[in-house]
Amino acid sequence: MSHSKGKLYIISGPSGTGKGTICSRLLQDPRNEFSVSMTTRDPRPGEENGREYWFVTRDEFLENVEKGNFLEHAEVFDNYYGTPKDMVMKRLEKGRNVILDIDVQGGLQVRQAMPDAVLIFILPPSLTELRSRLEGRHTDSQEVIEKRLSKAVNEIRLIGEYDYYIVNDDIERAAAKALAIMAAEDCRVPAKVRPLIREYEQQQKGE
Amino acid sequence: MSHSKGKLYIISGPSGTGKGTICSRLLQDPRNEFSVSMTTRDPRPGEENGREYWFVTRDEFLENVEKGNFLEHAEVFDNYYGTPKDMVMKRLEKGRNVILDIDVQGGLQVRQAMPDAVLIFILPPSLTELRSRLEGRHTDSQEVIEKRLSKAVNEIRLIGEYDYYIVNDDIERAAAKALAIMAAEDCRVPAKVRPLIREYEQQQKGE
């Protein structure tokens, strides 16, 4: 039984839910890879082309948009960000799983393009807990925190579009759940079952 | 986030695939319970009413059939066997998962009655391997083994009706996969997401 093709996993959730930590756990399995986005923003010191992002000019980016080369793209603070389709597809073909850490709007765009994608929503244990995590970071003003919380609730309202949800009340448990989801998805009966059945039928005839 | 209700798991697969061993691993988790079938056959020495089976008369059984009390039932060698609906429902309501070790025909009957049931198919690594396992048991004649193998292929032809499949090439790995499927199913976004969203909305208003 060969699991020839990989799967695309979309991990979304409000900022402060520990999504990044969960994703980095998933990457410990060599079968899983991050998708590298394309962006028009300037590289920051230490960032490498093709590692953090693919850095391109505005014209190059828009050309890719026109050619339909993105699974999703968005403009954030005058810069473009997008998920290059061909790189995701190539990895899936090679049997690698691709992990996309992306917001809910982006996630839903990707699902349109890739109906087989698996969408996982990471939830904070409560909004109160999310607030105290954001405050504990000491990076955001009170105003920004309020905006993040309100955005969080708006994102959570779209959870019905997702396949799975994980309440991150404990990072170890949450990461284990994400890994269980991936293991279970590997066991999904594929849409095309004929090749799987044929294997057994042929053995029957061969005997 | 309360996972109030349990799930019904249907485990099917040809005889000799190690289905029973996988089921008994699942039962090590106290949240999981076996469904006890009702039967008209006589109890064997050591069997207890309500443990191995609910032993009833033919009339009692047929009365239950008429009342629609079974999720599935079948006649095997002049005896009836059936899965009592109310006992499964009661356990699910209590938040327990119910495990049904049942053949494919029965599994598909149950899915009709319970569309939310999760169907898992246990496959042998190959038909050749299944043959040698059946031969290794020294319990069946060559003729019976041939029948079992042919029944196995007929069952495998229905795998497209199942949600998951596990190739049992190693019992530890296979049991781990079954547990991962159950853990993943616990993370499924429910059909009704309103209560889940409301929790966060109320916290937002409360703040």
Image (tube, coloured by chain):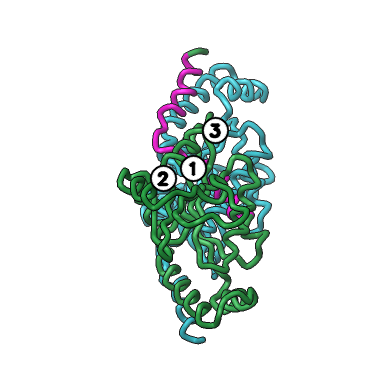
Chain colours: A cyan, B green
Chain for numbered disc 2? B
Chain for numbered disc 1? B
The residue wearing badge 1 is B7
The residue wearing badge 2 is B116
Asked if marks 1 and 2 touch (Cβ < 8 Å), the reply is yes
**In this picture, which residue range is highlighted in magenta?**
B176-205
Upstream in sequence: badge 1 or badge 2: 1
Observer-nearest of A54 and B96: B96
- Percent across and percent down for residue A44 are 63, 42
> Could you give the CA–CA distance between mark 1 and mark 2, rounded to whole angstroms?
8 Å
Observer-nearest of B135 and B93: B135
Q: Are marks 2 and 3 on the same chain?
A: no
The residue wearing badge 3 is A123
Asked if marks 2 and 3 touch (Cβ < 8 Å), the reply is no
Q: Residues within 10 Å of mark 3 (few under 14, many from 20)?
A: many
> Could you give the CA–CA distance between mark 1 and mark 3, rounded to whole angstroms?
22 Å
Q: Are marks 1 and 2 on the same chain?
A: yes
Residue in view at x 46 percent, y 21 percent: B201
